[in-house]
Image: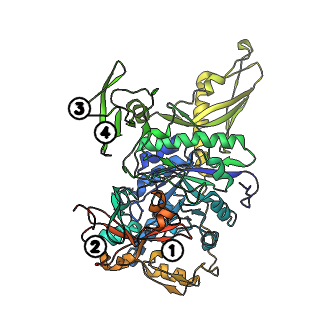
Amino acid sequence: MRAISMHVKGPRAIELLSPARDAATGIAAITHGADAVYIGPAKFGARSAAGNTTDDLKRLADFAHQYRAKVYATVNTILYDHELRQAERMITDLYNAGIDAVIVQDMAVLRLDIPPIELHASTQCDTRTPEKARFLQEAGFSQIVLAREMTLPEIYDITAAVDVPVECFIHGALCVSYSGRCHASFATCGRSANRGSCAQLCRLPYELRDARGNKLHASSHLLSLKDFNTSLLLDDLLDAGASSLKIEGRLKDTEYVKNVTAAYRHILDKIISDNPDKYTRSSTGTAEYRFDPVLSKSFNRGFTHYFLTDRQARQISSPLTPKSLGEPIENNSVLHAGDGLSFFNRGGEYEGFRVNRIDSGKIIPAKMVKIPRGTQLFRTYDYQFDRQLRQADSATRRIEIDVTLYADRVCASDTRGCRVVIPYAGTRDKARGKMDYRHIFEKTGSSIYRLRNFTQELSPDIFIPASELTALRRKLITALDDNAKCTWHRNLRRKENISFPYPQDKLSYADNVSNSLAYKFYADHCVGHIEQALECDHDYREAGAGKVVMTTRHCILRELGLCKKTAKGSKIKEPLSIVNDKGAAFMLRFNCNRCEMQLVMPMADDVKPKRRGSRD
């Protein structure tokens, strides 16, 4: 991998960005090592079930800023005209609450009358090219979230083209479609992923049929992907220029966020420590854990690097189940009563059970279950591990301070760059001799501080009563807190270069222009032809009929070993379709030059009611 400059002097700030479904989870993420968290406000977030009040977001921001960590609010749905003023007021409230940035998809936000808060381009913006990234930078975005499907060389090409930080996903669930380009849910049932209401059709089972209606592959979860895991590739991602490393999961529970954040914090700290001239951390404070993080113990459908190291990666799907597989049970695995285990029965069905007790090495289940000899077991719930994560003190995060005690003052500085001086009047008492006062300043109690270095510049005849030193210590902590609040600052929104043209002169329905201000934004940037978003049509069935509703790098044929470029795959009769027993059906198109697959919403007469060659 080529070295990258990122157009900055000195070490590049690296941000570990964690999800938060609510303020409590966000606080846990910060405590367990996150440099920033992203969280949904009351409305207009791409996870409609994860909204939070502005007061809760202020509480989270106040906590995060102690560590110079940041809070980003996800205002990343597309907006209708009647919602624009409400979004405007909400973003203003978020700014006043101390939120550091808002993550947006809808370009209308750049035409709202809002404070100069930083704007981040959501992954829903579908940024896959240097040209698109450069435009977003010129439009005024301060951070750009890339599509999940990128390879390392593609990430490098983008980071080399921009001056702003580039954000990449590193862990968690994968959308099978390019984000922002999926309309399958809306076209099928009127629930828009771009409006935060995805029906997750990709997690359902489908059977694959050829042009004659013959079944090519039995019903399985053909569109359901494994979970992303880049824990072994963080060095490469940083070399490619990624500066913000994002964990997916705004609907995940607090225990998931604790474990995954801690795991990546460990890895990143080692990389940063080994490369002090290249990288630095974007926040401060050292986390100490009362558990050993293990990624496989949290929800996962099996892991994949996705396309990071291979543009045509295979075996990235989880066809047998969309549920968590957890960790494989090996011969040396230690099980406990209360653990949750799962397996696939002989029919390929996913079953699970709880462990009642372990008796002489034998697993006694809480319910009767038949498991064939030799079956691979998975632990989907580790009772002991989860109990550790549920503890309120599963981690603490401290800011280290250096204290110097003089005859007339005490000085303290911390890793945030804060420095305070508290004067006092010492007592002279030659009879007592020189005393060591370090132990008094070590007692930082429940504060966020921990004494690192202590120096006392006192002559032997100076005596200070313990009560006075204790009061001085308390004053120091209060003064450091006040100094941190006074010196906290946030970056402001970049200026928009109104003359910079959008890299395309036409926009289709897939570009999600759903209001007049977004239309004006693109027109200002030289786009001549602009279609309205599918969501603007009230009849979702009519809006989606015959249209491409999903574009993905995941190819079902490639995954099944039936790539059209192979002899076996070339004999398949097209067009192909996938059909779900709940009525969802899509036609398939393949762009082999780009190695992409498209799902097309069929017209009324495109789906045959009866399968030929089947046993219906």
- Left/right placement of residue 349 relative to residue 99 reads left
Q: Mark 2 vs mark 3: which is more N-terminal?
A: 3
Residue at position x 57%, y 42% in the image: 265
SS of the residue under disc 3: loop
Quadrant of res 576:
bottom left
Which residue bears the numbered disc 3? 368
Circle 2/circle 3 CB separation < 8 Å: no
Give how far across and how far down residue 328 sits, in percent.
Answer: 44, 36
Q: Identify the mark at residue 608; answer none if there is no mark.
A: 2
Q: Mark 4 vs mark 3: which is more N-terminal?
A: 4
Circle 4/circle 1 CB separation < 8 Å: no
Which residue bears the numbered disc 4? 352
* Residue 514 visible, this orientation: yes
Q: Amino acid at mark 2?
A: Lys
SS of the residue under disc 4: strand
Q: Mark 3 vs mark 1: which is more N-terminal?
A: 1
Identify the image quadrant of the C terminus: bottom left
Mark 2 Cα-neighbour bin, 10 Å: few <14, some 14–19, many ≥20: few
Q: Nearer the viewer, residue 260 or 119?
A: 260
Hey, which residue is sitting farthest left in the picture? 616
Circle 4/circle 2 CB separation < 8 Å: no
Q: Amino acid at mark 1?
A: Met
Q: Mark 1 vs mark 2: which is more N-terminal?
A: 1
Q: CA distance from mark 1 to mark 2?
A: 41 Å
Which residue bears the numbered disc 1? 107
Q: CA distance from mark 2 to mark 3?
A: 42 Å
- Left/right placement of residue 7 relative to residue 610 reads right
Q: Nearer the viewer, residue 131 or 38?
A: 131
Mark 1 Cα-neighbour bin, 10 Å: few <14, some 14–19, many ≥20: many
Circle 1/circle 2 CB separation < 8 Å: no
